[in-house]
Amino acid sequence: MSQSVLNEYVVGLRQATRVIVSTSGGKDSVAMLLEVLETIPRELVIAHHQIVLEDWPGTVEYCKATCQRLGVPLYCTQATYSGYECLHCHHCYLISCASLTIPWCRKCGSYRARYLRQVENVLDLVEWRQAWPPLSVRFCTSYFKRDNFNAWARANAQLLGEHPVICLGERALESRNRAKLPVWRGRSGLKKGWMHEWRPVLSRRRIEVFQKMRAYGIEPHYCYELQGMTEQDMYETDIEGGARMSCVMCFLKSPGQLRTGYYTQEGRAVMERVLAVEAKTGHTIQHGLALAEILA
């Protein structure tokens, strides 16, 4: 971090009118919440959870219980979209249901459109786009995480104040792309200069975030154990990788993790829908590899 960015970071936290911890219920976001509470006055801290219907069942309840235990107000929102077809150029597009915008086609500017369907979850979006998200364009994150939060932030500007900060739980050791992320920067998609992003656990190791949770007596989400992680894996083994908290059917998961999602009661309904979407669209969850082949 350059000296100028460091100075901006220090000043930004001093001036913060509200610090919003974006929590998924995963180990990194829970450890991040704990670190934020150690750093920021408690009365400034709130949490926000973006509901994704393909998450492990009980995730919303886990987030609520964790925040209630720590005395942190939690706000939950779920993104939904309406799909339209332009009657002039036949371009198909989505409009956020949280937006008051009259449906209009960005391709030709026409306001004449035909309603097609609702898009309420990631698998709806895959059907709509007739494609799974690739690593380079993770549109599932854009629609149901980033844009969802930004819409909530705009609607709650009075609550957040003049200088809000959102905390994100990425860690540099998770991937090459995350290793390039800055600790501090302006938030895109919102009024310039209004909100900043802070990544408190960017430099932490996997073992450190699990150990942080254990120090506070907080049990990790059940999905880690369900996907094969033992207490030794979590608290004693200093390696990266392993089970992910993300959607049951995240395309980034290994074949073994996807099989776990299918062969457990908690994940079966989501994975059955994946099979149906693959059959309907002809597109596979991973490049050249269908879920049916992975299960076989």
Image: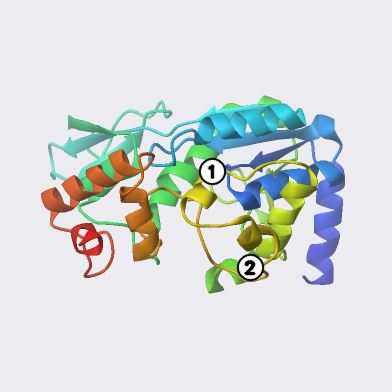
Measure the C-alpha gap from mark 2 to mark 1: 24 Å
Whole-percent x, y for residue 90 in the image: 13, 44
Q: Secondary structure at mark 1?
A: helix
Q: Compared to 199, does 92 lie above or below?
A: above
Mark seen at residue 222: 1
Q: Compared to 115, does 205 lie above or below?
A: below
Number of other residues with Cα within 10 Å of mark 1, as a class: few under 14, some 14 to 19, many 20 or more: some
Front position in the image: 274 or 217 = 217
Marks 2 and 1 close (CB-CB < 8 Å): no
Mark seen at residue 172: 2
Q: Compared to 75, does 233 lie above or below?
A: below
Whole-percent x, y for residue 262 in the image: 31, 49
Residue at (68%, 57%) from the top-left corner? 185
The amino acid beneath tag 2 is: Ala
Q: Quadrant of residue 87?
A: top left
Among the two numbered marks 2 and 1 on one chain, the one whose residue lies closer to the N terminus: 2
Whole-percent x, y for residue 125 in the image: 29, 44
Asked if residue 97 lies left or right of residue 12, the reply is: left
Mark 2 vs mark 1, foreground winner is: 1
